Image (cartoon, helix red, strand yellow):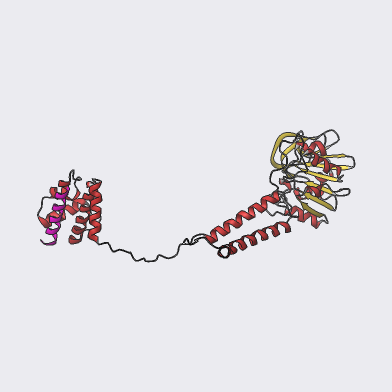
Amino acid sequence: MSTPVGRSAGESWRVLRTPLLVTGAIVLIAIVVMIATTARTSGPFSPDSTESDGARALATLLKNHSVDVHSTEVLDDAVQPGDGKALVIGPDGSLDRSDWQRIADARWSHLILIRPGTRALEVLAPGVLDTGQILSSSSRRPGCDLPAAVKAGTATVSGSTYSAPDGAQRCYGDGINNTVIRVESDNRIVDVVGTPRTFTNAELADDGNAALALDLLGTHQDLTWYLPQWESSGFDDEDSGGPPLVPPDVRYIGWALAFAVLVVAIWRGRRLGPVIAERLPVIVHAAETTEGRARLYRRSRARDRAAAALRESALGKLHKAHGIPRRADPSAVVATVAARTGRDPAMLYELLYGLAPLSDAALMSLSHELDVLTQEVRHP
């Protein structure tokens, strides 16, 4: 008759219910936090970020000047009808030509493009070209009659530079390469800015950066602050990348699950308690242990180890009998023992620190000599 040794369904549930409940609670909290913060943005040039590369200071400045700032990372918010409104589009992300065309069709009254790519320029700012030149960070005069630049005066600018068609206003450059471009067409104003650093928390208070940012982004009372992510409505043949295989929301849930698994693993991991004395089932006498080790040495012909063990034992007795420190120099040990026993120091040195015996007979002779020496010290 066989007896089952596996767990029953009830036992398995009792063991697993706590880890499952903890994991579920962590995942639920992560999802709630993610949903609650969906409308908020994060990362560089985010109006919600207080890091040095964030733009919380600029968003606060705009709100203090009666500009209603809406931050988003969702493309659908950037393609809503924008008549009488302004849209600032941050750097990075991945949008294809059809996405940029949808933004253009929304008819925003004012577009501010921060370090735009070639595809965005072709659709939203025709004639503006990226020169491929990078200006080092420095304070520069506007060099143009753009009201926002004239009012701001000197500003700290750097980064990508652009060339523009006739009729466009070119500011903050070296005369050929410019970091701020304004073009107007179809009753729409498009500003191209080569770097977000000028408007970040770290540099907003420098030179006239705050005034320039306020006059460029604060032209309308309704401002949508869009930071493109890795989501696209589609991708055409010219798009080398396209939307990612894993949407951002799924990645967040995956990270939450991974964190939950880590917490449960740490919680359920083996914990080392205090050392517990355990009674041995069999008492092994010291003589039997010594004899067993001797057999092992003999079987492996380890005469060197056997001799070293014999000499170490003899030296321990000699040190104890004469009060010699355990780390005493061999010459001091030999001199002390020779003075006590009257033996030749050279012979004592060979006996206590010499070479390993080459045969079993020599090993037995060494053992006998060491035993005689310790007897002489113990009973002079």
Position of the C terminus, as image quadrant, is bottom left
- Tell which of 213 and 18 is nearer to you: 18
**Magenta segment main secondary structure:** helix
Is residue 216 among the parts visible in the rendering?
A: no
- Tell which of 225 and 5 is nearer to you: 5
Q: Position of residue 360 (x, y in %)?
A: 17, 46
Q: Is residue 376 magenta?
A: yes
Q: Which residue is located at x 25 percent, y 46 percent?
A: 300
132 up-or-down from 94: above or below = above
Q: Which residue is located at x 77 percent, y 52 percent?
A: 71
Q: Residue furthest right?
A: 187
Q: Position of residue 186 (x, y in %)?
A: 90, 40
- Please indicate whether residue 177 sits to the left or right of residue 354 in the image: right
- Tell which of 100 and 268 is nearer to you: 268
- Tell which of 22 and 109 is nearer to you: 22
Q: Position of residue 242 (x, y in %)?
A: 73, 39
- Please indicate whether residue 181 sits to the left or right of residue 307 in the image: right
Q: Position of residue 299 (x, y in %)?
A: 24, 47
Q: Which residue is located at x 86 percent, y 35 percent?
A: 167
- Image quadrant of residue 11? bottom right
The mark tally for this picture is 0
- Please indicate whether residue 90 sits to the left or right of residue 312 in the image: right
- Image quadrant of residue 136? top right
Q: Residue furthest front?
A: 1
- Magenta stretch bounds: 363-380
